[in-house]
Amino acid sequence: MARPRAKKRTAAEAAATDSSKPEAAAKEPAAARRGRGKRVKAAPPRPEDYFPEKRNLEDLWLSVFPVGTEWENIDKIKEFNWNFENLEKALEDGGELYGKTVYVFGSTEPQLLYVNGESKIVLIPVIVVVDCPFPPSDKIGINSVQRENEEILPMKAMKMAWVPYVPLEDRLSRIDSLKTKIFILSCTQRRSALKHLKTERVKKFDYCMPYYMPLQPIEDEDDTVINFLYPLEPPIVDDFDWEMDDYEDFADQKVKDELLPEDEKERFKEFLKEKVRERKRELKQAKEARKKAIDDMDPKKKEAFENIKFYKFYPVNTPDTPDVDSVKSKYINRYYRNTHYLI
């Protein structure tokens, strides 16, 4: 009798049966077998893996343009990790400037400080806060001993303007909803474009300083001292008091000190006389301009300017920054003069 034929297996059934055999397991790739191994828990993050949380106003001082700082020196400001927590506390809830409208500008002061046991010129950033509901000025002064004439220009001529600053935690909020209104002096001049500008235009930025015309005459409006630079090689840089100094004696002293050639003396005296005439004209024009500005001023703005206050902030001392306490100064610039509060 014929033996019954076995049922033919399908390919799927054959594969299932073969995979259960020991030799099939041996042929399984090693990588696949390792993949089914015991899971290893990830190591918990170390403290140094965390980034410190940014303070709400931490980048305020860095957002302010350092007016009057040479372009090639701006990067030197970041040589140290300066800290302005004193500025932040003044503007935060509980601080003396909280809830006010303020205008903020920056500058730098080169000072000889001890750094790691050695004397070194350090560019110290300073921040000035103007407590006033109106902009203190929309102008910039351009002045230095090296320049013959002072210029007062609109801020926009130097690509500067007061712009709103919004704290980190409020950057999704409307500006008008903020308790403290902060406006910073900003500059939109791109450093990469400086090479396309004339040297004279670039140097103007080096001599910029925020302008302010106080309602009351500043202390030195009746001053009789001029600063001058006489173009020789090397140049003569000095002060001359037209009430205390005599032209002839002053020039003779420069000759005696071998700073001025004898045959240059008469030209030098005429130079000084012209500088004195220029300064007297400036003082007269300043008085007239102030009188006109006050007469034309809105009463509310006049009242605000009568109560205006200046706050000058230096960096706080930290273990990794130089100590600046010994070089703090109340002087701001020739227009703002001295601060009301030095912090």
Image (cartoon, helix red, strand yellow):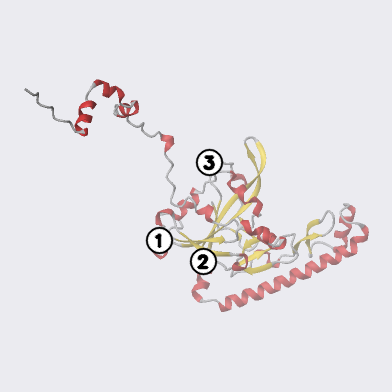
Q: Which residue in the rendered view is the most extreme toward the left? A: 1
Quarter of the image holding residue 15? top left
Which residue is nearer to you in this view: 51 or 326? 51
Residue 142 visible within the image: yes
Mark 2: which amino acid?
Answer: Asn
Identify residue type, mark 1: Lys
Q: The disc labelled 3 sits on which kind of residue?
A: Thr
Question: Dot 2 lies on which element?
Answer: loop
- In the foreground, 80 or 284: 80
Marked residue nearer the N-terminal end (2 or 1): 1
Residue at image point 60% right, 65% down: 159
Disc 3 designates what residue? 318
Front residue of this view, candidates 7 and 334: 7
Task: Look at mark 1 in the image and give the residue it sits on.
Answer: 179
Residue at 74% x, 62% y is 147
Find disc 2 in the rendering and name its residue. 307
x and y percentages locating residue 125 in the rendered image: 59, 50
